[in-house]
Every structure is written in structure tokens, then in C-alpha cells.
Image (spheres, rainbow, N blue to C red):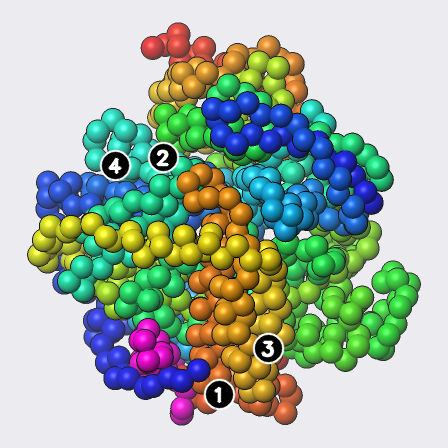
Amino acid sequence: MNYTIGEPIADTAAPVGPIEGRWDQRKFSAKLVNPANRRKHRIIVVGTGLAGGSAGATLAEQGYQVVQFCFQDSPRRAHSVAAQGGINAAKNYRNDGDSVFRLFYDTVKGGDFRSRESNVYRLAQISTQIIDQCVAQGVPFAREYGGLLDTRSFGGVQVERTFYARGQTGQQLLLGAYQALSRQIDAGNSGAGGVEMHARTEMLDLIVVDGRARGIVARDLVTGEIASYLADAVVLATGGYGNVFYLSTNAKGSNATAIWRAHKRGAYLANPCYTQIHPTCIPRSGEHQSKLTLMSESLRNDGRIWVPLTAGDARKPNEIPEAERDYYLERLYPSFGNLVPRDIASRAAKSVCDEGRGVHGEGVYLDFADAINRLGRSEIESSYGNLFDMYERITAEDPYEVPMRIYPAIHYTMGGLWVDYDLQSTIPGLFVIGEANFSDHGANRLGASALMQGLADGYFVLPATINDYIARGGFSDVDPRGAADPATERLERLLAVNGDRTVDSFHRELGTLLWDNCGMARDEAGLRKAAERIPELRAEFWRSVLVPGTGSDLNQELEKANRVADYLEFAELLVLDATVREESCGGHFRTEHQTPDGEALRDDEHFSYVAAWEHASSGPVLHKEQLTFDYLHPSTRSYT
Amino acid sequence: MRLTLRIWRQSNPETQGRLISYEVDDISPDMSFLEVLDRLNDRLILAGDEPVAFDHDCREGICGACGVMINGRPHGPGQTTTCQLHMRAFRDNDVIDVEPWRSAAFPVIKDLVVDRTAFDRIVSSGGYITAPTGSAPDANAILVPKPDAETAFANATCIGCGACVAACPNGSAMLFTAAKVTHLGVLPQGAPERSTRVLGMVAAMDAEGFGGCTNSGECASVCPKGIPFGSIANLNREFLRAARSS
């Protein structure tokens, strides 16, 4: 795919001065909107996960008219609900040497020095307020006997700063945000501002007028009605694009349509090649597999990862003596052991499996025998009970008796729409929060940081920065006529193809192509192969996809077809970004660029930038945002 | 494995639905129930038929989107979600009836998809703690005894799937409402709104057309998250307490 290099991005709108004061400075310099005037402004929020739910509730509390959308039947089902392990916060309740600066340092280092210092520092600062907010809402975090909050450790760090609610932290935080949102939905119903909620309604397009985001086109998934919704600003909180790989830990409905349509309307898309592969997922069991299930990283606190020492060892795990097991993470990374960051743990699993030492080909053991001996079964049950039950239900194996089998899977995407320090995209009035933006995790996200970022963006950052945009005003009337036409025509085209292949068969083929050539390890030849095949596959899709039914009622195949059509475009940019980034960093591993020990080899001289892609009919345009490090020195990550 | 699925097909809320039989073969015991529906749908689509509509999303038992009656039991055998039900729970040549939730408060939208927004309206009628963003004290300023935190958590795990309503002979939403009332009521943060919460939620529950509770216990026996049946007694206690003092 041809691309051109455009103007670099010189300004990210971050304040200058000491990093500790930048966020306060921005909050002070941002214009405010008088409370009485806020009710005159309408803001659209798309998505109701941690970022969208918290943003919608908070904006409505401030007095804005919020119109909110989710494709699920209830805002409580957004995929944040599935996050298991926990949420980081620099509370230092453990007195174990934690601090805002340490969380900042761990996050930038964990991201392999490909994130912005200003943003990450702000995230670390806000982390402490998030825990306060969630506790006040009634989120039932784990507690000590004295009634204080409990914490645990997580991958990539050496302090215990992760707050958790058993293995269901995402669910509990999401219900907190959902309940706050519900309070505002109730206020909206009684005519007092609040939130106007549209569930089972999916965004299909962004409405841009005079260069500003002024609304969305969305389809009611039950009636099929496509309508335009107008506002003074639009907030996308639509999550990541992991499902481009077909098999991932994302929910089946999670999709990239909203961000891709915004991209095609002018929003830059940054670092799409930064995809996170989570080391501890349940291996696939057959061709019928429709999604992959994560086993929380928190399991690595007590579980030990190993494979047989010799290739092809077919004995049952309990029959393999200690001396013939290779606890490879403990061997390779003695100081972090099983708690190395996700990208490192995933690649290590791949490499032992590539050596033929994998369990049933693709799998490694996660063994709790030592922990059960040390702590007792009941202690393990209380920490991980629900995860063990889930594992047993899926695999029919009892992890209290035999080690779990795990293998890496696509889990999270660090890339997303480019945003400035205010979380505003390159389209004025379009704000992007949570996983949908690219901002805070660099090339690799640390465990328990997604919940932190989603809630930081939604509860605290966006509600402060969006005021500045609204206060500057200049909102002329918008004529929505014709806005819905492109989206409507596309659905009609999908229905009209009437070919002979299912949507899923295309999605599966695309996913396999990406996983094989742009997954855990990437090289030029594989990327070229994917780049050649994607346009062919897209052409085949538009020639031979079969979408039954009509557009005028609930039609789940049509919903899927519309999303897959976007994946088939988006995938090309993902592969291009991976091709252009000729270095290894975090979740992006180019086999041509590795140390003699097989670790990622960054090239700071040439690639210490954010790759922000602009859509153009002549091909993508790459705008580079140079990353500068004033407080931390980019070093080779070492977890040994 | 080979199975016969008798599936409820209904085009929209206005039309009459009926059970239609489908043979599905080549089923592996490791498949989830929804993956069997996927396989059937693939076949239906290629044959030019309409696939079966069903709700699902996370497919790991936590979002609460999926849920169908399987042989008359919500989520089928095993007290789990439909997505976590694996085919090893069935035997070769079994005949399985698959229907949507049956409740007046959950109207059928299409096939196996029902409208559960009544649950959202119960929550928006008081199922929250009023804590506007930014107003919170330090997290450790609020002490919660561990047993209370455990009770709150056990009730907070409700996924809002609606199996309790579908199982109940009265179509009651008491277990769902009780879980939220208990979760928030047991916590010190939830105390100030304890009375208004229970009164508001119970009124909303009644207005939505859910039935009353006659202690049959079917709800708790199918709840995928094991919400304690005793929470319903707590809901009654909370309601009486609030009603008498208001």
C-alpha cells in the first residue's frame, strides 16, 4: 500500500513547565462554561463502557444534555464488564515505595517508551481519585479484616498497587459507572437534563460540518431505522479493534466501525500496529471456536508457568518430575519471574512452543500446586475461585488438580484515534476516550491499567477539557439532510450482493491472515503477504458475501457484515503501520529487530514517534509526532 | 454428536411464534451452546433461510447478554450462562427445546431475543449511590467490615441476564432487585439512600409488570452467579422498614 509522509505534528496542546503541575495548569487555562449555560449544549457519547459510562454520567452531572448510545441491549453490558484482574492506583496504602512518579515510570517503561510523558503523568496523578470515586459509589473492592482496602501486585511492577474485586473488577467498576449513568437517565426521563439513552443503537457515521464534529448517524438495531443525531461535540468511547483478528478476548460485538468511520471523516489514527497479546488465555479447542477467554493476569501472582524441558514430552503434567520441567519465565527473568509484562510473557510462550515444547502444540502450563501447598486451597479459592470455575467449565479440567493450560491471544489494542492532551482528535469537537484512543499505553499496556485509563478519561479528564471546547462556542445550526445517505447506501449494497459466503467466513479468513502474519511476531515477508491478500479478500467480500434478510428489522448478519467491511479496510492500515515501523517495541515485534537473546530491539533514533495516519483518497498520509522524554530516560527494558 | 434443536421462531413482537425443528450434526463436546447456534446459523444462511436471532456478546459469562430457555430451564443444565454451557452436558441424539425468556415484562423482539430494558428502569429508579464525580472522600476513610464487603460483592455479581425472572412461576424480578438493594444497603456509603432506594426500585418493579414472590426459589436455583436466595428476605425486610417509616 502506498503512503506518503505529511507534516509532523508539532503541538499536542500539553502545557509546558514542571510535569507535576501540567494538569492543574491545563484545568486552570481551560475555559469554563457557566452551569446555567451547560444545559443549552448537547454532547453525544458513543459507548457505555468504563470510559463512556463515566463520561456520560459526569457530563450530565455537570448539567450538559447528554445523548448516549450503545449497541448492546443495556449500557451495563459494555465489554469493560469482562475485565478481571484489577485497577492500578498510586495510593501507596501498602507503604511499599509506591508513588505517582513510580506509577508514571512503570507505565512509560511498560509501554516501551512509546507514550507521552505528559499524558501518562496525568494518568498516574488521577489514579488515586478514581479509587475514591468508585468506593463512594459502592464498588465492593476486596478488603482487609480491619475494613481497609486490599491490594495485590500485577505484571510489570514490583509494588502492590492493584485494587480488585475478586476476578470481576471490570464488572464492578462498570456497574458503578452504569449506576451513576442510570441516575442521570432517570433525571433525563423526568425532564431535568440528564442522559437520553439509546441502547441497541449503533453508530454508522460521523457528521462533520465546517470541519467540526457535529453529530452521528446511527441505526436502531431493532427497527432498522437510520437517523441523524446532532450535537455540539461528539465523544467516542467505542473501545478497541482487537476483533479484527476474529479470535480475541473481546466480546463478539466489539468493533472498530465508529473509529474507522471517524478516521475516514478526517480523524488521524495512531499506532494501529500496537496490539496487545495477553499471555494467559485458554487455548483454542477447535475450528468451531468463536472467541477466546482470558484468564486474569492476576493468576500469575500465584501460578507458575512451565513447559516440559524436552520437546515432544507427551506425559501428563503431574507425571513430569520437577527436574524435567522448565519454569522458563523464572529462569529467563529471575527478578520479575512470572510477573514480567504481557508482551514479554507472550513472546516467551510462543518461543517455547515454537521449539516444540508446547502442550498440545500451542499451550503452556500455569501451575498452582505450589501455591495450594503454601497457602491452602481455601486461600486460592477466595482469590481466584470464579476464574478456576470458569476454566473448569470451558475445559472440563479441574485446575486445583491439574495445571491450567494457557496460550496468548489478542486482548487489547494500544493504538486508536490520535488525540491531543485534551483528548480531542484532529477533528475539532470529536473527543476520543478509553481504549478507542491511543494515548497512554505506548506500545504495551501494563495489567490493571486499562480500567484506570478508561475511568481517568471519563470521570476526570474529558469533563474538564471538553468545557474549553464548548466555551469557545461558534455552533451554527446544522442541516442534517443527506447526512445518513452514505451509511444507508452501504447497508443496501451489503444486502444486494447476495453471494455465497457467510460474513463469518470472511472474518475468520481475515483474522487468520492477520494472526499468522501480523500477530505475535511480524516480519517483512509476512506483512507483504498480508498486504497483498487483504485487498483481494475485500474485493471477494463485496463480490460474494451473503447477507440474508432486510435492513428494516433486527438483522444480526447485517450488523456483522457492516463491521467486517470496515475491518477489511482497517486491516490494511494496521499492516502498513506494522511494515513501516521497522523496529520492535512492546506488542510490536519485528523478528528482524531483536537482541541476540530474542528481546525486542527498539530503534529510538528513527522510531521514537507516534505514527498518526491521515486518510486520503490517494493513500494514507503519515504524520509523525516526535516523542520527547524530559523526566525518564528511554532505556532497554530489563526485567531480568 | 448429533442433536435435534426445536427452536422458537418469531419474526417480530406482533406475529405468532412457533417451534421449528433443526438437525445439527458434527457437534463436539467442547463446543459452547452458542457455538452450536452459530453452526446452525451458518447452515441456514447458506441455504437461503433466516438465521436464528439470539443475544450474546462477551461469551465468557459476565456480560449477561445471552440467555435462552433450554428444555424449560433458563440457561439449561448446570446453573451457568448459556454461553458457558458446553455440549458435554448433552448426549448424542438428544432433542433440545430452545425458547426465549417467557415473561410479560420481557417482550419477545425476535426469535430468542427479548427486551430486558425493564431491568434498566428498575436500576434507574434508585439502584445507585448518589456520589457525583469529584465529591468522594479518600477511599480508606470509609471502613467496610470484611463480611459486609463480602455480602455486598456476592450480591453485586448479578449480571442482569433475567434468568431469575424466566424461571419464576410468577415472573418476579425480586432476586434481581434484592441483589442491588442488598449490595448497596449493606455498605455504609449506601445507608443515606437506603429507604428511597428500596421504595423506588420496588415501585418500578411493580410498574413494569413483574409478578410477586411466593418463595418458590426457582430464581436462585438457576442464577448463574449464585445470588443468595436470602437476599429476597432482606429486600422484604428493607421494604417493610422503609414503608413503615415513610
Residue matched to label 4? A194
Q: Relative to residue A210, is residue A610 drawn left or right?
A: right
Task: Check disc 4: other Cα within 10 Å, few if <14, some if 14-19, many if 20+.
Answer: many
Please give the range of residues in magenta.
Answer: A605-632
Answer above or below: position of A193 versus B39.
Answer: above
Q: CA distance from mark 2 to mark 3?
A: 43 Å
Cα gap from disc 1 to disc 3, whole angstroms: 15 Å
Q: Position of residue A177 (x, y in %)?
A: 39, 42
Q: Which amino acid type corresponds to the residue marked 2 in the rendered image?
A: Ser
Q: Nearer the viewer, mark 1 or mark 3?
A: 3
Q: CA distance from mark 1 to mark 4?
A: 48 Å
Quick one: label 3 or label 4, which is nearer the N terminus?
A: 4
Label 4 near label 3: C-beta < 8 Å?
Answer: no
Where does residue A287 sit, x and y in percent of width and height?
A: 72, 59
State which tag comes first along the sequence, 1 or 4. 4
Label 1's element? loop
Q: Label 3: which residue? A: A517
- Residue under circle 1? A582
Mark 1 crowdedness (10 Å alpha carbons): few <14, some 14-19, many ≥20: many
